[in-house]
Amino acid sequence: MKPNARPEDQPVMDTPTGGYRPAEYGRVSVLVGEGGGAYPHGNSLLVRGSSASLVVDPSLSLLGAAPPADAVLVSHAHEDHIAGLGGYEVPVHIHEGDLDALRSREALLAQFGLPSDEADALGGQMWEAFQVRERPDARGFGDGTVFDLGDRTVTVVHLPGHTAGHSGFLIEPDGFLFVADIDLTSFGPYYGDVGSNLVDFEASMRRCREIDARWYGTSHQKGVIEGAAEFRRRLDAFAGVVEKRDAALLTFLREPRTVDEIVEHRLVYRPHVEGPQVRPVERRTAVQHLDRLMSGGQVAEAEEGRFRAT
């Protein structure tokens, strides 16, 4: 269950079979998952160099159809990005910030911040529907780490905020930047996990904006965007969702409100959406926006535990 997926994107799943549609961008193959990579599927990459090859973010679509590779890179430890790892007995690499979550079931579930019974239920779904397994052999990388494939390099671009270790990958000389879950969807940025951070997410979007590439690949429905100008236009619209949440909160705080009231009012999910993740995500999101607006002087604590727009 992906926290930022729409409810219609969260079906009750049987164990899936593999299947993807390859799309070529230089020597980078985007393995487009079912529904254009819509959750619970995703878009994976296969990068072929003269001396080695690697797969990025093996999704559900690779189950039973995993292309051979010498290594696997994972952008971050969410279930839809690691579902296909079971098909690989090769070195697996992830940013140090998400390393524990890939190595340990307990750490993977802890990042969602759910009560223990709901975390157990989520864990059961991940293990059964997504076939997620612990990878205690996973290795950590840092920002700027370079994977040399011979005539190609893959450079880690740390883009935290979605998770602490969330990373993109710049593939050269093809000029392909994979931005993972900076996915440009209308839902907007998701920063509702325990290790998420709104300030970091905004900095990561600014960093993406400064990187000139020929192609920009996303994990989900938006697929691959060609050209820096078009990518930046879409990135600005995506980032604008954060400003809309700020504006919605300021409107709601014309009268003094508690955090619980903000959670029930909702900044992230539509009112009809229910699920164990909704209130924890809304609370973590609300607190981050409150902190921003208070530090900027736009919101003040009118009385203990109650906040109002200034």
Image: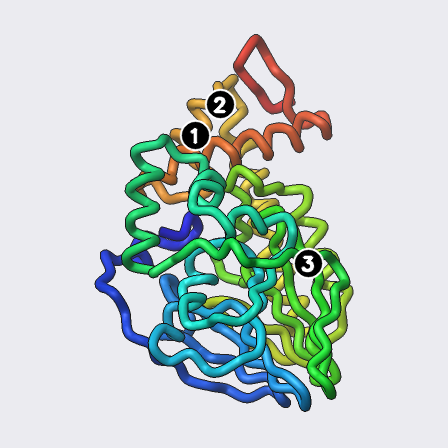
State the image coordinates of residue 287 (x, y, percent, origin top left): 56, 29
Disc 1 + disc 2, Cβ < 8 Å: yes
User: Distance of mark 2 from mark 3, alpha carbons?
Assistant: 37 Å
Label whose residue precedes the other's in the sequence (3 or 1) = 3
Q: SS for tag 3?
A: strand
Quarter of the figure that contains the C terminus:
top right
Q: Residue at x 57, y 68 (%)?
A: 91
**Which disc is residue 263 wearing?**
1
Q: Residues within 10 Å of mark 2 (few under 14, many from 20)?
A: some
Q: Nearer the viewer, residue 183 or 90?
A: 90
Q: Residue at x 53, y 13 (%)?
A: 305
Residue furthest toward the top?
303
Indicate the amino acid at tag 2.
Val
Q: Nearer the viewer, residue 92 or 230?
A: 92
Viewer-side label of 3, 1 = 3
Disc 2 + disc 3, Cβ < 8 Å: no
Q: SS for tag 2?
A: helix
Indicate the amino acid at tag 1.
Val
Label whose residue precedes the other's in the sequence (2 or 3) = 3
Q: Is residue 267 above or below residue 16?
A: above
Q: Is residue 198 above or below residue 221?
A: above
User: Distance of mark 1 from mark 2, alpha carbons?
Assistant: 6 Å
The answer to whether any part of residue 272 appears in the image is: no
Q: SS for tag 1?
A: helix
39 left or right of 183 in image: left
Residue occupied by mark 3: 141
Indicate the amino acid at tag 3.
Phe
Q: Residue at x 40, y 43 (%)?
A: 269
User: Distance of mark 3 from mark 1, alpha carbons?
Assistant: 36 Å
**Which disc is residue 259 wearing?**
2
Q: Residue at x 49, y 23 (%)?
A: 259
